[in-house]
Image (cartoon, rainbow, N blue to C red):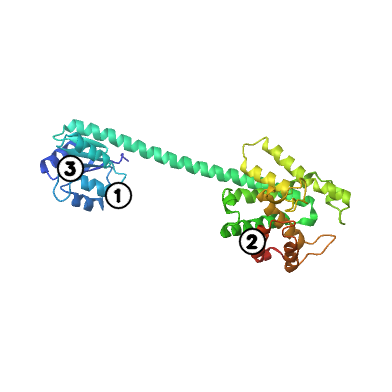
């Protein structure tokens, strides 16, 4: 099968120029000739050319008017256009090039020069298409590889989160539920304009994924404490509270081996501050008010709500109304009041999570 010949349309109201141009090009290209701009547009309904040779001075529409129409239409704008004209002044040439022409050939033209100029421009156009195709393919390859890497990261993250949760048998499903709560809460806060500017500066997907590591420090908690079926003693609770600082240490250790910052920064803040309290009575640092990072203030309320709604060896699961009353009671004590207000307005959306 032979190489497909390039198609060239020659537009000129002079029959001699049409004949001369066609004779010069016919051995190498499929040449279509038309005497005016309107007839060019008719031909373009049937033929997709690789190049248009366009006369400037024509009746009905001059060449500048024709190219202006072509360049405004997405389908025709990429077609290379060379002006053929008897005008040789700099102003006319500049006008044509500024409208999108790739070259300007003066008439009467040399057939051999015309062929060579067309050959060069078609080669450039072909290479441009190949480069665009290569870039498109490269971008798709990057997207595919990124998707693959992100998928692997998410799989590893999910496995680590499940490993943490499997060591804490009394909190099954806690990680996934709190992630869902956070998604509902964050979107509601943006919608209501609460801490909107700061939240908009985050990548929401990265933030939500990182929340799965908020309890990663429990990996370092002793089994006798983590698996205890009764309420912890004061001494044991002191040890349990260390899961926040252990979590920060684990995430910092991961950070030594990767350049990924946003994800790990969210994860470290969530792990280290989700037990801080608005009134400063929380742990491990006793931070107060807005000194507690927003990520930690958000996690604090969804973490407590899920604990209230879940069964523990030392307590029953509270109903939604009971949990809401407790959250409201501790507003301004344990939690950021502005976040409490939004959370309570969206709490019904979380009800499908519980059996």
Q: Is residue 147 left or right of residue 349?
A: left
Q: How many marks?
A: 3
Q: Residue 321 carries which label?
A: none
Q: Which secondary structure lies at badge 3?
A: loop
Residue at 86 percent of width and 56 percent of height = 231
Q: Where is residue 274 in the image (x, y as percent from the top left)?
A: 72, 50
Q: Residue 72 carries which label?
A: 1
Q: Earlier along the polypeptide chain: callout 2 or callout 3?
A: 3
Q: Position of residue 164 (x, y in %)?
A: 75, 49
Q: In this view, does 201 lie to the left or right of 338?
A: left
Q: Is residue 29 left or right of residue 127?
A: left
Q: Name the residue under label 2.
A: 342
Quarter of the figure with the N terminus: top left
Q: Which secondary structure lies at badge 2?
A: helix
Q: Which of 156 and 168 is in front in this view?
A: 168
Residue at 76 percent of width and 61 percent of height = 308
Q: Which secondary structure lies at badge 1?
A: loop
Q: In the picture shown, does residue 11 fall above or below 340? A: above
Q: How many other residues sit within 10 Å of disc 2, few (<14), some (14-19) or many (≥20)?
A: some
Q: In the picture shown, does residue 331 fall above or below 158? A: below
Q: Do the residues labelled 2 and 3 touch (CB within 8 Å)?
A: no
Q: Mark 3 points at which residue?
A: 56
Residue at 69 percent of width and 52 percent of height = 297
Q: Is residue 178 visible?
A: yes
């Amino acid at each position: 099968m032979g190489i497909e010949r390039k198609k060239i349309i020659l537009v000129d109201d002079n029959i001699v120029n049409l004949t001369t141009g066609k004779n010069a090009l016919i051995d190498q290209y499929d040449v279509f000739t038309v005497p005016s701009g309107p007839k060019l547009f008719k031909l373009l309904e049937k033929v997709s050319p690789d190049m248009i040779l366009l006369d400037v001075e024509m009746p009905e529409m001059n060449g500048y008017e024709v190219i202006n129409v072509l360049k405004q239409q997405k389908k025709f704008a990429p077609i290379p256009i060379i002006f053929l004209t008897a005008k040789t002044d700099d102003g006319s040439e500049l006008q044509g090039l500024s409208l999108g022409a790739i070259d300007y050939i003066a008439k009467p033209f040399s057939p051999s020069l015309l062929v060579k100029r067309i050959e060069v421009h078609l080669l450039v156009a072909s290479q441009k298409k190949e480069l665009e195709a290569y870039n498109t393919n490269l971008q798709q390859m990057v997207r595919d590889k990124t998707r693959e890497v992100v998928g692997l990261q998410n799989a590893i993250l999910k496995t680590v989160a499940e490993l943490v949760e499997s060591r804490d048998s009394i909190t099954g499903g806690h990680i996934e539920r709190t992630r869902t709560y956070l998604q509902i809460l964050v979107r509601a806060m943006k919608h209501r304009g609460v801490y909107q500017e700061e939240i908009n500066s985050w990548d929401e997907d990265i933030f939500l994924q990182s929340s799965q590591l908020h309890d990663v420090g429990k990996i370092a908690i002793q089994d006798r404490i983590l698996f205890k079926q009764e309420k912890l003693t004061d001494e044991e609770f002191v040890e349990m509270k260390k899961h926040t600082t252990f979590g920060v240490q684990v995430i910092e250790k991961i950070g030594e081996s990767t350049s990924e910052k946003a994800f790990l920064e969210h994860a470290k803040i969530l792990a280290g501050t989700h037990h801080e309290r608005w009134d400063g009575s929380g742990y491990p640092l006793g931070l107060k008010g807005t000194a507690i990072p927003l990520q930690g203030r958000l996690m604090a309320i969804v973490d407590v709500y899920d604990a209230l709604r879940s069964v523990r060896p030392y307590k029953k699961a509270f109903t939604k109304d009971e949990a809401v009353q407790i959250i409201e009671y501790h507003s301004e004590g344990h939690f950021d009041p502005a976040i409490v207000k939004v959370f309570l307005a969206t709490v019904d959306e979380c009800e499908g999570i519980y059996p």
